[in-house]
Amino acid sequence: VPTGVPLRDVREQLFDAAERILLRAGPGALTSRALTQEAGCAKGVLHRHFSDFDGFLTEFVTDRLVWIDSQATALRDAAGTGTVVGNLSDALTTLFASVTPALIGLVITRDVLRTRLRQAKPRGLPVAREAAAMIASYLAAERELGRISAGAEIGELAPTLIGTGHLLFASWEDPAPDAEAVRKAVASVMAAVVHDPSLDARPA
Amino acid sequence: VPTGVPLRDVREQLFDAAERILLRAGPGALTSRALTQEAGCAKGVLHRHFSDFDGFLTEFVTDRLVWIDSQATALRDAAGTGTVVGNLSDALTTLFASVTPALIGLVITRDVLRTRLRQAKPRGLPVAREAAAMIASYLAAERELGRISAGAEIGELAPTLIGTGHLLFASWEDPAPDAEAVRKAVASVMAAVVHDPSLDARPA
Amino acid sequence: VPTGVPLRDVREQLFDAAERILLRAGPGALTSRALTQEAGCAKGVLHRHFSDFDGFLTEFVTDRLVWIDSQATALRDAAGTGTVVGNLSDALTTLFASVTPALIGLVITRDVLRTRLRQAKPRGLPVAREAAAMIASYLAAERELGRISAGAEIGELAPTLIGTGHLLFASWEDPAPDAEAVRKAVASVMAAVVHDPSLDARPA
Amino acid sequence: VPTGVPLRDVREQLFDAAERILLRAGPGALTSRALTQEAGCAKGVLHRHFSDFDGFLTEFVTDRLVWIDSQATALRDAAGTGTVVGNLSDALTTLFASVTPALIGLVITRDVLRTRLRQAKPRGLPVAREAAAMIASYLAAERELGRISAGAEIGELAPTLIGTGHLLFASWEDPAPDAEAVRKAVASVMAAVVHDPSLDARPA
DNA sequence: ACTTTCGGGACATCCCGTTGCT
DNA sequence: AGCAACGGGATGTCCCGAAAGT
């Protein structure tokens, strides 16, 4: 029975529901019906607030990209503090413990979604691209500060780190990989460019 | 009209059909109907030879893993020849120009497939895991030969290289990334451990 | 933002919106949402002023029947002037160039609408019935004036003329049939009863 | 539970089911679900045998056009026998007592159907056009035989008769109009061109 | 009294596993 | 053993009626 009462923050509720589904069961489980059911609302609500199911997905991913961007800012602000490898590891762990790997899964399999997200910036795989940009921005800041080599090829290292993280986390059954695994991977990739390895040693 | 005549190499025909679909349209397009239609055989054939559609996928992926393994052997045999970065770049380009990225896409989104492939070796993302093993095997050989540092952490570098390649190729609309992009990425990752950078310089 | 201010002539605005939709896209496009959107008002307005969507349609068609009736009066007043075939042709062209064919389409496919319109006068197809009455009324006048045979069976000729016009105009892609086609059809039907064929000759 | 047994004459069964629905409840009731339910088969059957629901409708209407054509042949063969008005009345009664009026209703409201049926012959309203051709063919034969005036404008009279019949029968609640009403309408339209009125006089 | 939203039924379509004939 | 069809669940979308809030 209709209530006539506007739902509170419909978009956010649907976004959150989508996130819960993705985290729980992966991109294959995110259907429009599963979504509205998880959100506890009627099917019509979805199409009232979004053009399309793909339209919803597009806006949903875009919304999470904003979150990624906020993580990017936080990471860049951490430049110069702690250790390079530590900062990177923390950021990657946070990033991939989130819904991000599932987003990449969505982008890989949903053709329409990928196409729409491409319309703005046609280069690269949508979500992964922004994640790499986040890393690249941080690396540039550290290079400026002199904590990594002037010759470090940031444009190559950033996607490398993202690709690594993606594969480590791209599954929904595993227990999330421990932070240590991430740290070791990051340390290996960054070995050639980080100036003071001692900074990156784990506190015993 | 039913023939009753056994088809020749049904499994291989279906595998090839699946590969064509994946290369042409990505993992989202690989349905059981698309498969049998592409193979030019009846739907029933699929269930005669395979338990399930997911069963087919499992065997299909397993079959392609054999191909990856053959690539691994070839790569390992190349140890000591050419340059390390060159060998790695060539191998990655070959690997990701193939159906491999689509396989990873399948594994990421098809829950049942991923689960089944996990039953044997529960660690890591199935196809990516084998690809990483291929790289790791080669790196070990080169380390043995002294062309990369004794301290190189192969267990970290290999998945890194695979993750990088995956993101570079995980789309079906883009023109395939050129070999040079791969080479640059590999060079960055390997910078710290390859002994003789001159070996990796591109022939002018 | 709700205004609380009564809209001016809500009913007429909705009627006009319905007419625009019918003329533009045919009866299949007349949904309640399309209607309120075309009228630029909220969905609720419809149910405030009408019992039902079918209730709206009923009143809408009834309203247009008034227009048909006014056409009928004008036509009857033309009795004795011009030529019989000319008068009939003009009237039919005007009638079917209007929203009338779409109304008949509505009546044919919308069961509830047809049923409700039938409740008053159970004989015949609603809108077509009134259109035929319009013709019949005119023919009666002309018979009175002696311009058509005393024996002319008006009750038969009128629906015939309407049916003819309906089929000539019952499509929304065609360019509207030219007036000449209508004239020829009318002339054929009326051939037996019009007294002075010369009156019906086209001005050279 | 699937049977594996091919249904007998699936197409005909679906056609017949569609016809029953149309006769019982009119064009508005002919949905894909109503169809398969009436036919007592699964939804999938429809899409296995027809491209589309509109595809089904197109083939269905086309199939009934064949029936109309057979009626046309029978009518033409009757030329010279009985009376002109009698033959026409019988043919029209048969035609419109059938599913034909509902077909015209379908064609009027289903845009896609109308468009597809138009692709072959773009002139006129599809089903009505063929029905008119049936009448025209008969009238031509009678004119040849001298039973109607040499000057009879067949191209005008035929659609007129169809239009008349359409309106007389275009409803699904009414008791079918009696044959006498049809006869009177036909007699009126044909009055000017039939040579021997006595032939058309009703047997007292 | 108008506006906005929700609720949910229906519709056309897709897809997969099964079944019986050839 | 291959073939061809069926059965039916699920998906995304549309549409109408109803119930608030402003």
Image (cartoon, coloured by chain):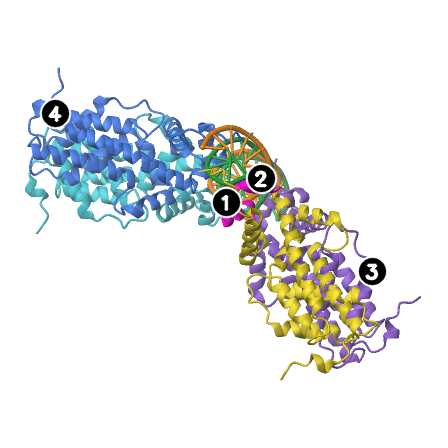
Chain colours: A purple, B yellow, C cyan, D blue, E orange, F green
Query: Do labels 2 and 1 touch, CB within 8 Å?
Result: no
Query: Do labels 1 and 3 touch, CB within 8 Å?
Result: no
Residue at which label 3 appears: A179
Between marks 3 and 2 in the image, the one whose residue lies nearer the viewer? 2
Kindly identify the amino acid type of the residue bearing the numbered disc 4: Thr
Kindly identify the amino acid type of the residue bearing the numbered disc 2: Arg
Residue C94 % position (x, y):
25, 45
Q: Is residue D86 above or below residue B201?
A: above
Residue at which label 1 appears: B41
Residue at which label 2 appears: B48
Residue A64 % position (x, y):
68, 58
Frontmost residue, C152 versus D160: D160
Mark 1 surroundings within 10 Å by alpha-carbon count, few (fewer than 14), some (14 through 19), many (20 or more): some
Residue range (magenta): B30-50
Res C63 visible:
no
Q: Chain of mark 3?
A: A
Same chain check for tags 3 and 4: no
Residue A30 % position (x, y):
64, 48
Same chain check for tags 4 and 2: no
